[in-house]
Image (cartoon, rainbow, N blue to C red):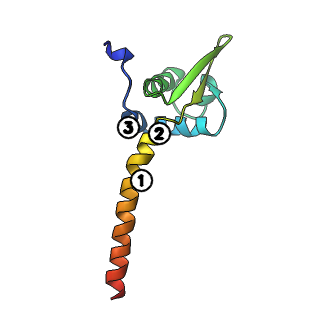
Amino acid sequence: MNNSCQKQDVYVAIADPTRRKIIRLLADTEELPLYELTAHFQMGRTAVSKHLAVLKKADLVTNRKLGRETRYRLNAAPLQEVKDWLSFYEKFWNERAILLKNILEE
């Protein structure tokens, strides 16, 4: 399969702070056009488009054409994998904190 058609790892997609900010911006609204997303960054439309392409490959973003404008929307479903992975470590650290608290109270 061609690399450009392969699905991007969701962890790779969210590793970049710019892409996390794009996800956050899209989470706060139903959909946004590229020019509105670009206004939140100190970079050009091409750079923001490249970040959106990574998010699209990870199925975190969908887009639709509306006339000459492309509008982007968050698809949060792939983030469930990240949530599940993090929940194990949240439980792990909560248990360690309780153990530490018990030791300190003795």
- Tag 2: Cα neighbours inside 10 Å, few (<14), some, or many (≥20)? some
Type of amino acid at the residue the image marks with label 1: Ser
Give how far apart the Cα atoms at labels 3 and 1 are: 15 Å
Give how far apart the Cα atoms at labels 2 and 1 are: 12 Å
Quadrant containing the N terminus in the rendered view: top left
Q: Quadrant of residue 31?
A: top right
- Can you give x and y, in whole percent of width and height, for residue 36 in the image? 64, 28
Tell me what residue is drawn at x 47 percent, y 39 percent.
79
- Secondary structure under the numbered disc 2 in the rendered image: helix
- Tag 1: Cα neighbours inside 10 Å, few (<14), some, or many (≥20)? few
Q: Residue furthest right?
A: 67
Pick the front one: 48 or 29: 29
Tell me what residue is drawn at x 50 percent, y 26 percent.
48
- Can you give x and y, in whole percent of width and height, for residue 94 in the image? 39, 66
Tell me what residue is drawn at x 32 percent, y 12 percent.
2
Please tell me the numbered disc located at residue 79: 2
Quadrant containing the C terminus in the rendered view: bottom left
- Can you give x and y, in whole percent of width and height, for residue 5 in the image? 38, 15
Tell me what residue is drawn at x 49 percent, y 31 percent.
60
Residue wearing tag 3 = 11
- Secondary structure under the numbered disc 3 in the rendered image: helix
Type of amino acid at the residue the image marks with label 3: Tyr
Type of amino acid at the residue the image marks with label 2: Leu
Q: Disc 3 vs disc 1: which is toward the camera?
A: 1
Pick the front one: 10 or 39: 10
Please tell me the numbered disc located at residue 54: none
